[in-house]
Image (cartoon, helix red, strand yellow):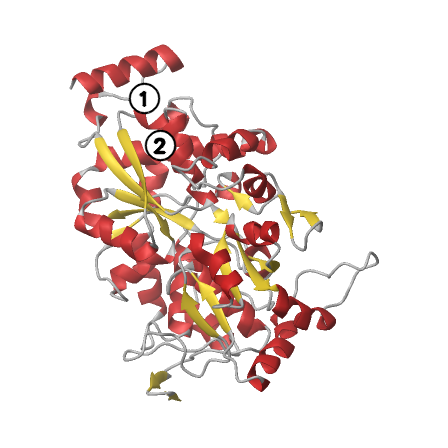
Amino acid sequence: MIRKLLASTSIVTALGVTSLHADTFPEIEDLTLGFIKLTDMAPLAIAYERGYFEDEGLFVTLEAQSNWKVLIDGVIDGNLQGAHMLAGQPLAATIGFGTEAHIVTPFVMDLNGNATTVSNEVWELMRPAIPSDEQGKPVHPISAEALRPAIEAFADQGRPFNMGMVFPVSTHNFELRYWLAAGGIHPGFYSAENVTGQIDAEVMLSVTPPPQMPATLEAGTISGYTVGEPWNQQAVAMGIGVPVATDLDIFPMRAEKVLGLRADFVEQNPNTVRALTRALIRATIWLDENDNANREEAVQIISRPTYVGADPAVLRNSMTGTFEYEAGDVRPVPDFNVFSRYYANYPYTSDAVWYLSQMRRWGQITETKSDEWFIETAQSVFLADLFLEAAQSLVDDGLAPAGMFPSGSDGFRDVVDHAIDGIPFDGRTPNAYIDSLPIGLKGEQTVVGTEVKG
């Protein structure tokens, strides 16, 4: 109680408002939250460093985790009360793909933030197939069709073409698969018996933890990867690779990382979850406000070894609205990292449905499901009501501008028609969308052994 009173007093003194009321004190004050060393863990670092957690009566410890499996296991077993989590992880856990547990999210940490990088060897094989602009620079977006000469050259040499992604249900896996398939290259299926994801694959995708991506590329174990920042820009800085596509090119503006929590924790600790959500919303507002004016300060914070531990010059590229492809080819990408703009923090049902559609497309969901199943599953994990409650309380306290949040939304974005393959996505009709994709499972199809049946 003393901590609660101190926190409340601090808020009154610093802000002139009382964010904590007697009936909304957190049920649990001391929390340990996990994260992976990526730039999009920034909301956690900013909420901690700027005192937003303490304003909400929370005393938070942030702990870096070695990989995504360790992170989600920590949340499930209670060693972590919550975590910076891949948007697909709560969905996959809830439906029982991999680790089974009901994980939910009331808060999306960011949109976008990933890229696909290839080795210098692969880039040299791709480059003749890529058109150039008037300055002789590659025209973006680059289609995965340009990867075909490299795949064929590797096959002629008897070498497998290996690429890395960070986790089977990561955005990175689905983005890399989307990019490859849009270019006519098969990334492989999963089945109930074979969870490698390499059935019938032309490119072999496997898991590599994000901070290890550049070293693994340099060693030649993989010839490319899809990962979040700063590990694409790190490859450029090391002179070992070239980014060829960002997620803004592939399938832009959908949930990237989320605050992952156990469903029973949310049910038992509603005030704590509300306080966490409020603190993180405030952090993301700070990260995006005044046309990203605070990003340089954010870069200095997250560059510390306790957070991302990367050179500020490498972090600065994507965080301040530019992106470097080949050395010296720096282009403006103002929406590469989005933390609060475009209703970024709202957990859209349609974003969750898209992830589930990709799980079905590649066989992680082994059998056909109804449209209603996709939507109901999405809504059981992406908890928009909890987000809006926390967001409205910030508006009521004068800590967030009115109109910043989509209070009237039904949870579905407008139809997306600007993916790299041009195929429209409507979250209300996921099966029609799945059936419209040229490569992937459709209808009643299943993977049996190494063959698609049905």
Q: Which mark is residue 260?
A: none
276 to the left or right of 351 = left
Amino acid tagged 1: Ser
Is the C-beta separation of discs 1 and 2 under 8 Å? yes
Residue count near mark 2 (Cα–Cα under 10 Å), binned few <14, some 14–19, many ≥20? many
Q: Residue at x 33, y 79 (%)?
A: 191
Q: What residue would you read off at disc 2? A: 278
Across and down, in percent, residue 301 comes to 47, 31
Q: Residue 271: which quarter of the image?
A: top left
Identify residue type, mark 2. Answer: Arg
Horizontal side of residue 392 vs 94, given as left or right: right
CA–CA distance in space, label 1 to label 2: 10 Å
Q: In the rendered image, is residue 101 in sight?
A: yes
Q: Position of residue 144 (x, y in %)?
A: 61, 71
Mark drawn on residue 19: 1
Residue 143 visible (yes or no): no
Q: Earlier in the sequence, mark 1 or mark 2?
A: 1
Q: Residue at x 50, y 60 (%)?
A: 226
Rendered position, 267 above or below 442: above
Q: Is residue 59 above or below residue 230?
A: above
Secondary structure of the residue carrying numbered label 2: helix
Q: Is residue 280 above or below residue 132?
A: above
